Amino acid sequence: MAALEIQGLTKAFGPEPVLRGVDLSVDSGRLVAILGASGSGKTTLLRLLCGFETADSGSIRIGGKMVSGPGLHVPPERRNIGYVAQEGALFPHLSVADNIVFGLPRAQRRARHRVAELLEMVGLPAAYGVRPPQALSGGEQQRVAVARALAPNPAMVLLDEPFSGLDAALRAETRQAVAAALSRAGATALLVTHDQAEALSMGHAVAVLRQGVLVQVASPERLYRHPVDPELARFVGDAVLLPGVAKAGRVCCTLGHLPLSAGMMNGAAPEGEVEIMIRPEQIRLVSGDEGQGASARVSTVTYYGLNASVRLTLSGGGEPVALTALVPGHQSPRPGDTVGILVEGDVMAYVAKKDRGNA
Amino acid sequence: MTTRTVPASLDRPPVVIVRRRVPPGLLAASAVAAGLVFLPLAWTLLQAFEVTLKDAVALLFRPLVGELLFNTLTLIGATTCAAAVIGTAAAWFVERTRLPGRRVFAVLAAVPLAIPAFITSYAWVSISAGLQDFAGALLVVTSAYYPLVYLPVAAALRGMDPALEETARALGESGWGCFRRVVLPQLKPALLGGMLLVALNTLSEFGAFGLLRFRTFTTEIYAEYRTGFNGPEASLLALVLVLLCLACLVAEVMVRGRARYGRLARGTRRPAAFLDLGWARVPVLAGFGLLILVTLGIPLGTILYWLTQHGSAAISPVAVTAAQLFNSTLSSLLLGLAGAAVTLALALPLGFLATRYEGRLITVLERTAYLAQGMPGIVVALALVSLTVQALRPLYQSAALLVIAYAILFLPLALVSVRAALVQAQRGLEESARALGLGWMAVVRRVLLPMAGPGLGAAAAMVFVSIVTELTATLLLAPIGTRTLAVQVWADTSTVAFAAAAPYAALMAAISLLSTWILARRFGGGAGVFAS
């Protein structure tokens, strides 16, 4: 059963349309990440789901119950949702335990209903209950906020960029703890983020919002390997884009003849002039004679330790082409080296922009 | 030079405060300022100790003191509650709803603070002789001081993370429950702090009660001074009053210090969502209209009415000559300028010391200066009168003594802004300038003054306004023949010459409103502009 059904949702602030017809369905128990750049409308979408804003048109059903539709706007307190704000928004005047039981009926509040269980669920010791929120680190506050949202058994949990305020080190750990807690609670959740690594690593599915429209809803792997257009390819990760000619499942470009991705575009493989997309980590650098024919000069190397980003200039005939490869740290070449290029795996191809309308 | 690490909370890097040697000249100048503030309190204590224990008991436990206590405490209870309800409601409607004209109401709700309470009192007394005693006092004091609750509560509402209210609603709380369980607890420090300021101002108020013939400690102390000038007896009453004031002051500092929940979030915030009032707009607008009418419309309207009346239309006809008006205005302005200059000169070294160095002695000096907030004008004035009469005769009834009294009374007011201005010009900038080869004179001229200058100017301007509208100390200490605007209003109203008082009252209100308006426009109207 779909825990969340959104149909044709639109919202404008003044003359500026922010959401232009969003359709989305989330199955019960799943965690969907809404990924979008700032200004894409992702926060507005979340605020419409929470009921903090009123939609212009379209409908929202949460747990099978219509909460927003023509002439209908159920206020937030009657939507049976859990909400985790950007920086947790723990009530500073209440202890951790009192925060967690805030949304429960009075009798259960008095009894500190399920506080220890919920704290454990988010990976915090039960002794934290008596602490004031000020004594918690940012990551711990965020976990308490999730426990508080889960306490009243909501039909779904909505998280508004819950990790953006945290340091890089805390972020990964907090993400894991939150994902684990949501899945242990069996909660349906929608997470809004601008961080592609966060969306890919946490979501069972990722929905990309661009200028008020969902451009692709897919599993993290499918989104990364088969983004629907070059712009999206660059948004969800680094991408090397090169011109080429597609024919019978293969594509010919300056890097040689490469296999086209089989699963793309509903089996209708493009033919003729295309733009191909390769992920930098697909490009392997080999000694001159092992390549697929192309060789390149290393112009700069940015060394990260774990890996290194290598800027290459293709030395073949015609105009020099620049591209980037991502290689393991211990294999990083030196600037000025000449290397052969080998592309691993298949590549994406997009029909040149002018006639891509039906893609 | 020693370095010490202050334990900091979990996420933040430890703060390192460098302890440096304090220049002795700076310390001495600061000690003079603090000592000056301490002087009236010490003298009052000394005078009170001259009374034998038996006499003291007899003087303190008599029906009169009981009556004064009862009057004062019931009035304080009623005023603080009324101010809390009105101030919080006004702040909430202005900051959280789409009330039409909310921006205008936001300003108008703060304006009563710029009109001295005794001017409001004069206006009401001149309308009806029936408006006296408790009811009149409650009306005048509440309408004069409710902004002391309104301003901090509005600021707290503005600073509150809207995600808190949203989270509460998502957790199933409706509007009222959300206010009661989330908003009100966050407002508590601002609300309690504001209520205590109202209580403090009510305790120190003299002029308004004098005109309303409502007996409190201040009016009784003045009466005793006028009738027999019984030093010790008045000092005992003053001591009780000071104790009540200091209790309020200490409670206020504690409320502010302890309940600093602070925001947990560090990021940027969305502005809060505004509530649509629907049909409830109409009664709320009517309420605001009534509030503005009572606190501003009637007092200012009455002054205007009396301005148009010939002197003989009043109960006791007194003519006002242009020369009198000019002289009064001139003495008010001159005293204001002199007082502002002296107060700023005293506040500067203390502010510099408090923002650039640290140590126990410095804390003590600064706290002593703030003690003046708990010293009603009548107590300071009375102490200075009796001190000069007994020990420093040449200073008695001199303009210099009056200026010193002003400096004592308004040092805390100046210190708050001086401190803020000096904090703004960070020490790091001075050090950078020194490293670039500037001597300390050049640092002051090229770095400190350009950065802190506007703040220091604001401090001087606030003191100036406060002095122009000050009544109590002026009444007791002004040299013979010097009649400021405030003293003229007092004298004419006391003899029921309402029309004669009107030009002075109008001039005073105009100076105060204009200066406050300029200050608020240049420095953003915050509570600091008004706090006294």
Image (spheres, coloured by chain):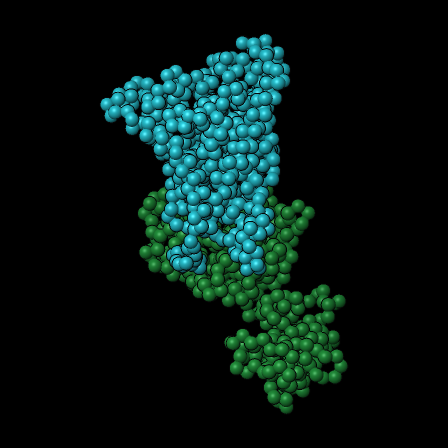
> Which corner quadrant holds the N terminus of chain B?
bottom left
Q: Nearer the viewer, residue A13 or A313?
A: A313
Q: Position of residue B363 (x, y in %)?
A: 40, 45
**How many marks do you count on the picture?**
0
Residue for point 39% across, 50% down: B359
Residue B267 makes an appearance in the image: no
Left/right placement of residue A112 relative to residue A216 reads left
Residue B364 makes an appearance in the image: yes
> Is A21 above or below relative to B177?
below
Q: Nearer the viewer, residue A48 or B517?
A: B517
Q: Residue furthest left?
A: B54
> In the picture, residue A276 is in which quadrant?
bottom right
Q: Nearer the viewer, residue B178 or A46?
A: B178
Q: Residue furthest bottom?
A: A289
Q: Position of residue B67 (x, y in %)?
A: 34, 19
Residue for point 61% across, 71% down: A238
Q: Nearer the viewer, residue B4 or B81?
A: B4
> In the picture, residue B331 is in which quadrant?
top right
Left/right placement of residue B386 relative to residue A289 reads left
Residue for point 70% across, 83% down: A315
Residue for point 59% across, 47% down: B450
Q: Position of residue B490 (x, y in %)?
A: 50, 19
Q: Residue furthest front?
A: B394
The chain coloured green is A
Tint applied to chain B in the drawing: cyan
Left/right placement of residue A15 relative to residue B80 reads right
Left/right placement of residue A199 relative to residue B77 reads right
Q: Position of residue A94 (x, y in %)?
A: 39, 47
